[in-house]
């Protein structure tokens, strides 16, 4: 069965007892890991219990398909259900899981982790169609979910974020759940105690992480800097950032340009418009942002947003390489920026 986004949290809190095998997949590998561990803890309590949790690699299952059924049928020495955790699964294991699900009993829970699987993925189809299995997709956190994660993580340290800090963190986090939590832990350590996180605190702590790569890609694309965009994309992909997260970062940047341009149309100066944004444009980017405000007319911004939306849909539905789709879309944005008169 397919677990829809609306049912994910309920399924994680109380998994369907008829489900003996769950596939957790998607581009957000931090979220894949977090949700897989939630399912493991639900059954075994402790991720490191050697009597109730066993881990298998995809290579081990591919080389010895019988090991999956053998481990699932093995009784726990300490009692209770066992969990078999399979890491880095892919379509090469489709036949193994198809055969396993045809005869699987409820002696154990099998939790399978995989990366991005497109609509054409044979492994994903097996789990979505089986009555005793479930497929759970993990995509980047949207703004609403990210607000909750930020508030929850900071509250654990007695911290709250100011509106500007919350806007900055929302804009610069969210592509990978584990990276998000790690960055928020680093921010809490930076603050050193309870209180309010300011924009300056957030920028000082998070600004040297993935946010830098997102900014580099967004400013290069919107500034028509094709060589700079090539470098920024290579760095971002090397750091493990996903294509959808990069597309969204550029979309956020274009929305901010649109909001600032609207403020200027109402009579504000470009400097006032940049300061009115939430979060405001950091001084190190003010010159480039101001130049892009004057170079991007609203019709071109609308067309650029359509390119980004279409590229994100392609990444999620076509099964084609997401990095190639992202790169092609951002190159089109950079080309439009040059035609509009933006300068690197």
Image (tube, rainbow, N blue to C red):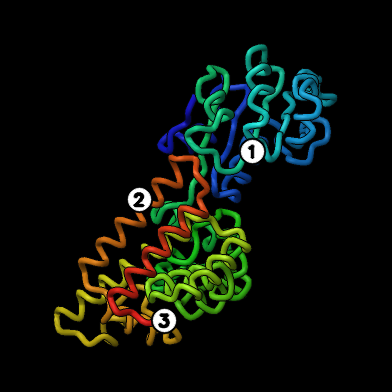
CB within 8 Å, label 2 to label 3: no
- In depth, the one of 244 and 264 nearer the eye is 244
Whether tag 2 and tag 1 are in contact, CB under 8 A, the answer is no
Q: Residue at x 62, y 39 (%)?
A: 114
Q: Is residue 14 visible?
A: no
For the residue carrying disc 3, how many other residues have a C-alpha within 10 Å: few (<14), some (14-19), or many (20+)? many
Q: Earlier in the sequence, mark 2 or mark 3?
A: 2
Q: Which residue is mark 3?
A: 344
Quarter-of-image position of residue 223:
bottom left
Callout 1: SS? strand
Please tell me the numbered disc located at residue 276: none
Residue drawn at 21 percent across, 69 percent down: 298
Q: Earlier in the sequence, mark 3 or mark 1?
A: 1
Q: Residue at x 54, y 75 (%)?
A: 207
In the picture of the structure, the residue carrying the numbered disc 2 is 310
Q: Residue at x 42, y 83 (%)?
A: 285
What is the secondary structure assignment of the residue under circle 3? loop
The image quarter containing residue 132 is top right
Direction top: furthest residue: 103
Q: Position of residue 323 (x, y in %)?
A: 52, 54
**Image position of 272 with respect to 183: above or below:** below
In the foreground, 99 or 326: 326
Q: Position of residue 19 (x, y in %)?
A: 58, 22
Q: Which image quarter: residue 256?
A: bottom left
Which of the two residues, 43 or 331, is positioned nearer the viewer here?
331
Query: In the rendered image, which residue does mark 1 sit on?
Result: 113
So how many labels did they put on this image?
Answer: 3
């Amino acid at each position: 069965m397919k677990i829809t986004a609306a049912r994910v949290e309920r399924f994680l809190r109380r998994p369907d007892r008829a489900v003996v095998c769950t596939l957790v997949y998607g581009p957000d590998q931090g979220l894949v890991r977090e949700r897989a561990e939630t399912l493991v803890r639900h059954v075994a309590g402790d991720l490191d219990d050697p009597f109730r949790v066993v881990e298998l690699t995809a290579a081990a299952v591919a080389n010895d398909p019988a090991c999956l059924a053998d481990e699932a049928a093995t009784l726990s020495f300490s009692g209770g259900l066992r969990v078999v955790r399979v890491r880095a699964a892919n379509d090469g294991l489709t036949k193994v899981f198809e055969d396993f699900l045809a005869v699987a009993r409820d002696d154990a829970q099998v939790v399978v982790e995989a990366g991005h699987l497109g609509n054409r993925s044979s492994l994903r189809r097996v789990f979505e169609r089986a009555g005793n299995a479930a497929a759970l997709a993990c995509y980047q956190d949207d703004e609403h979910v990210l607000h909750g994660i930020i508030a929850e993580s900071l509250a654990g340290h007695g911290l709250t974020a100011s509106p500007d800090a919350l806007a900055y963190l929302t804009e610069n986090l969210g592509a990978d759940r584990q990276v998000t939590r790690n960055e928020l832990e680093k921010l809490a350590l930076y603050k050193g105690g309870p209180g309010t996180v300011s924009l300056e605190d957030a920028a000082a702590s998070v600004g040297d992480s993935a946010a830098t790569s997102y900014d580099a890609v967004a400013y290069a694309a919107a500034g028509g800097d094709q060589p700079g965009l090539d470098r920024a994309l290579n760095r971002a992909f090397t750091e493990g950032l996903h294509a959808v997260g990069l597309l969204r970062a550029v979309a956020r940047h274009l929305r901010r340009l649109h909001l600032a341009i609207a403020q200027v149309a109402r009579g504000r100066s470009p400097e006032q418009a940049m300061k009115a944004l939430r979060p405001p444009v950091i001084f190190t980017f003010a010159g480039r942002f101001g130049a892009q405000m004057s170079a991007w007319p609203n019709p071109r911004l609308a067309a650029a947003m359509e390119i980004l939306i279409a590229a994100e849909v392609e990444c999620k539905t076509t099964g084609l390489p997401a990095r190639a789709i992202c790169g092609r879309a951002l190159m089109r944005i950079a080309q439009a920026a040059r035609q509009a008169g933006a300068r690197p």
